[in-house]
Amino acid sequence: FPTRRSSDLAHFGWNDLIANHITARVPGTEHFLINAYGLMYEEMNASSLIKIDLEGKIIQTAPDCPYGVNIPGYVVHSAVHAVRKDVQCAMHTHSRAGVAVSAMTRRSVASTNSAPPACAWPLMAAITGL
């Protein structure tokens, strides 16, 4: 799980206070780890992750963290992990580029290798039917 690099996400501006979520599948189970709602990426560590199942039941709490499950993260990521067994990690973030694209009235298409990945339009479209 990339928590040891979660501060890197903040360094690149891929954060929006506590409105981000990241999950990682626990190999060989129907469980995944999710960040607690209330922590910014730079505040996360392995001890602040919560293990939940696909139905949202808490399997193991985060002993060093007073916060609960990131419900928006659970809703979106459980759907991804349920149907995409090949996805080991999923992340939702609010980068400056992502916010800019989401504010556009027309969807954009990444035109260069360095362009943002259309701010997860394919994933969000698949989940929400956009």
Image (cartoon, rainbow, N blue to C red):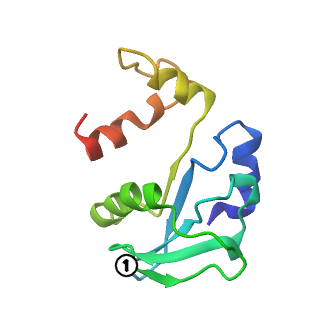
Residue 113 position within the rendered picture, expressed as x and y whole percent measured from the top left = 55, 26
Query: Image point 46% across, 20% down: which residue?
Result: 103
Pick the front one: 114 or 81: 81
Q: Is residue 23 above or below residue 51?
A: above
User: Hey, which quadrant is residue 63 in on the image?
Assistant: bottom right
Query: Image point 43% across, 16% down: which residue?
Result: 104
Q: Which quadrant of the rendered structure holds the N terminus?
A: bottom right
Residue 76 position within the rendered picture, expressed as x and y whole percent measured from the top left = 38, 54
Tell me: 36 left or right of 121. Answer: right
Q: Residue furthest left?
A: 129
Pick the front one: 63 or 29: 63
Circle 1: element type? loop
Residue 113 in view (yes/no) = no
**Which residue matches tag 1?**
30
The three-letter code of the residue at mark 1 reads Glu
Query: Image point 51% across, 77% down: which residue?
Result: 51
Pick the front one: 15 or 90: 15
